[in-house]
Image (cartoon, rainbow, N blue to C red):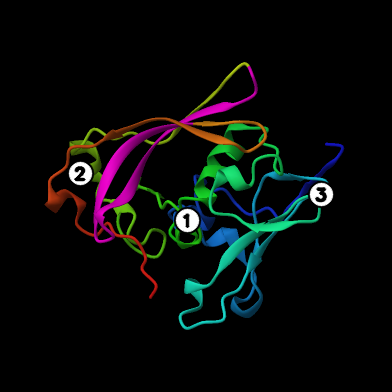
Amino acid sequence: MRGLLLLSVLGCASATGPGGAPPERNGDRFLCGPREARSLCLAVPVREGCAIRFVEGGSIPAEAEERIAVQRPSGGESRVQGPADLAGCVHITSAAGALEYLRLFSSRSTVHLFNPQRLEVFPGAAGPSCWTACLKPRVWRKLGLSEPRVTPRDDGSFEVARVVMKPEPHDWMPTLYRAVELVKPDGAVEILSETPVKAAPEDLTGLTFPMYL
């Protein structure tokens, strides 16, 4: 598309991994490259004149100072703390792109870069493909939860329904929500609704947010 640049593209989290392996739910694909020189990889077009980059941290642990920065055509650069800071610099053209864009801000590998924090929750066993953000399938069914659903709108935006958690009241004691979000073509995101999921503490065992001192 004329006037647009495309950042490096990696596989979507909803796709099955190589050899039928479980899909990657951690969001590792967003920070690609060697540990000492990682880049931001986002599978949506970036508008001409804008630049989005990952900034390494210099502390120990490095995650405490890591950030994502956006430079606009005016030349000014600012920290990205949520979708509002990228609005106008990206172009969302598909349902898959809308979901992947939301997952940049709500995946285990990147959630520490943004504020406020929200993590998408998935059904499945905890393990390498999904650390601290997967519910056992029996619990998922017990709570009546559903996989993400993306509905295109006539105005070019996308309505996304999915399950997320917030660090409430603590990082290690999250609250689940059924969230409905509106992703606009320019990257702006509006939360249409967040409905708490009634769950017993034992149902949420293993769900937690990454913490960096």
User: In the image, which residues are magenta?
Assistant: 155-181
Task: Identify the residue at horizontal 46%, vertical 54% (top origin).
Answer: 115
Q: In this figure, which residue is indicated by the disc labeled 1?
A: 24
Where is the C terminus found, in terms of image quarters? Answer: bottom left
The residue carrying pointer 3 sits among few (fewer than 14), some (14 to 19) or many (20 or more) residues within 10 Å by Cα, namely: few
Q: Residue at coordinates 19% horizontally, 57% vertically from top-left?
A: 205
- Spatial separation of the CA atoms under disc 3 and disc 1: 34 Å
Amino acid type assigned to the residue bearing label 2 in the image? Arg
Q: Which mark is residue 138?
A: 2
Chief SS of the magenta region = strand
> Which residue is denoted by mark 3 in the rendering?
73
Q: Which residue: 34% across, 60% down?
A: 209
- The foreground one among 203 and 62 is 62
At a point 40% along the width and 65% down the height, the residue shown is: 128
Q: Residue 98, relative to residue 76: is it above or below?
A: above
Mark 3 secondary-structure assignment: loop
Residue 205 visible to the viewer: yes
Element marked by disc 1 = loop
148 shown above or below 78? above
